[in-house]
Amino acid sequence: MRILINTLNFYPETIGIGKYSGEMARWLVMRGHEVTVITSYPYYPRWRVSDGFKKYFWSREILHGVRVWRCPIWIPTNVTGLTRLIHLATFSLSSFPIMFWKIFWRPNIVMTIEPPFFTSPTALITSKISGAKSILHIQDYEIDAAFNLGILKGVFLKSVILKIEKLLMRQFDLISTISGAMVKKAISKGVQPEKTFFFPNWVDVASSLQPSQGCNIVRASTYIDYRERLQLPMESVVALYSGNMGAKQGLEILGQAAKRFADSDMPLPQLHFVFCGDGVGRNALMDLCSGLKNVRFIDLQPEEQLVNFLTMADIHLLPQRGGAADIVMPSKLGGILASGRPVLACAHIGTELANVSKIGGLVVPPNDLDAFCGALLNLVIDPELRCRLGQAGLQYAVDNLDKDLILGSFEAKLKELAQ
């Protein structure tokens, strides 16, 4: 099959949508398909184009057999609701001529990845003219999230945009998304159930299984290196947040918890917080943690070190604002579960994030500092609880999130569509 993918984020970005769109394209090429990706330059989560890329020009390259077109994009220095919209719109405009030109390539499948939803009209036009089947893959209901989190405001504006979204979504041959709740959300927006497909983010389970065997943790050399590099005592308990530091994460609860434990006079095991990542919320979190000796900030780690880095932690922290429930699904959750370490997540009971997280961890309501610190304390003082929850999460990842299983199912769906 010839598969045309339009995605704002792509390899070499190592987290979020870029990670999964890159791995999917490479996997499909390895399966013998021709894949062309129309994307932009890597900028996420730092919100600046990576060194070596010229963001104001179009370029093309071949990566792991994938034909990649990179389109210019405007990156705001101050990320607000308005500047974010302009940023997304610039990619939609700059990618339009390349998408239109690829009509003559005669693809079998045209797939666009949301966000941004702005690219949907271009994908539909390209698929209709070329005779291809169209797919909208939703990693994040960005419109709902923008209004729920206050990034965009106005009842009339929301009504108009949601009507346009509903009209466009119903034109696609397939709507895929990453959680069961998000599939139901698509149906509630008027998409016929038979035109929806559950396509979750995956984990390379084979590599994730290496660091642990049952509850007897095998410490890899990289684990010791990370502790030494961060000057963390080997006997301490490490609570890790790793990923994008943006508006949807509710990161302030991390700083508040770190301060509360730093001021505690209870006889506890040493607890150290490691906050890894970048984004528009990093500076505010650093200010909140200023002067705390139990906190370390580091940049995102290389992809080849990710498994060992995640297993450095004893506890993974997954804050999330309540307004983002069931319209986003943190992509990092799969890697956390596969690490064999428990997660402490912020989510409302009954949401899919809560249902999956509680398999391998503890769940507390969003923005509830007392509940967050209480659950964290339970994990700190009870290594057997950490072990039991971590192993349950790992088993869930093995059974449900295996990369080849998920991508194989998606490939079968593509073949069904193309026929």
Image (cartoon, rainbow, N blue to C red):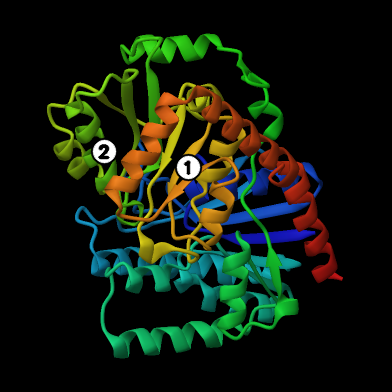
Q: Which residue is mark 2?
A: 257
Of residues 339 and 225, the one drawn nearer to the viewer in this rendering: 339
| Residue 248 picture quarter | bottom left
As drawn, 337 above or below 369: above
Q: Nearer the viewer, mark 2 or mark 1?
A: 2
What's the mark number on residue 15? Answer: 1
Mark sitting on residue 183: none
What SS does tag 2 mark?
helix
Q: Residues within 10 Å of mark 2 (few under 14, many from 20)?
A: some
Q: Is residue 208 left or right of residue 8?
A: right
Label pair 2/1, CB-CB below 8 angstroms: no
Q: Position of residue 90 (x, y in %)?
A: 36, 66
In the image, residue 57 sits, relative to residue 299, either above or below, namely below
Q: Nearer the N terminus, badge 2 or badge 1?
A: 1
Q: What amino acid is labelled 1 in the image?
A: Ile
Residue 65 at what x, y percent from top left?
68, 41
Q: Amino acid at mark 2?
A: Ala
Neighbourhood count class around disc 1 (C-alpha, 10 Å): few under 14, some 14–19, many 20 upward = many
Residue 284, quarter of the rendered image = top left
* Nearest to the observer: residue 78 or residue 357: 357
**SS state under label 1:** loop
Q: Quadrant of the C terminus?
A: bottom right
Q: Which part of the image, by quadrant, shows the N terminus?
A: bottom right
Q: Is residue 177 left or right of residue 92?
A: right
Spatial CA span between label 2 and label 1: 25 Å
